[in-house]
Amino acid sequence: QVQLVESGGGLVQAGESLRLSCAASGRTFGINAMGWFRQAPGKEREFVSAITNSGNDRYYANSVTGRSTISRDNAKNTVYLQMNSLKPEDTAVYYCVAGSSIGVYDYWGQGTQVTVSS
């Protein structure tokens, strides 16, 4: 099993930045991709960003492209999501995911709340 623990969420004002972190532990040898989803109140869960182990392949939702950067530290089994120029519509619970490849996410974290006030 793989455990994912997110951190870095909080309450910020529009225009500010946050960096989310997700640390993976357990049987991580089969993890080749990690990323983030989010779910806003009353909405479906949606993809935000993902990155491969090498860091060479990174993917972003249109809604965060240009404002967010995903990165990872393989030595720490940790993935980061730097979010800039935050908007109220970014308010959501952000979930870290991990899996064997991009788009195949077997593991989910508990989520961290991000709230952006206008």
Image (cartoon, helix red, strand yellow):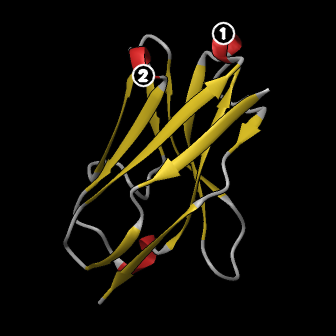
Using residue 52 as the reference point, say whether residue 30 is left or right of it.
Answer: right
The image quadrant that residue 83 belongs to is bottom left
Tell me the kind of residue under disc 2. Answer: Lys
- Determine whether the residue tagged by mark 1 lies in a helix, strand or loop: helix
Towards the viewer: 37 or 109: 109
Instruction: Quadrant for the C terminus, please.
Output: bottom left
Instruction: Quadrant for the N terminus, please.
Output: top right
The image quadrant that residue 54 belongs to is top left
Q: Within 10 angstroms of label 1, few (less than 14), some, or many (20 or more) residues?
A: few
Residue wearing tag 2: 76
Residue 2: image tag = none
Image coords of residue 17 (percent x, y): 23, 62
Q: CA distance from mark 2 to mark 1?
A: 13 Å
Q: Within 10 angstroms of label 2, few (less than 14), some, or many (20 or more) residues?
A: few
The image quadrant that residue 88 belongs to is bottom left
Residue wearing tag 1: 29
Image coords of residue 11 (percent x, y): 35, 78
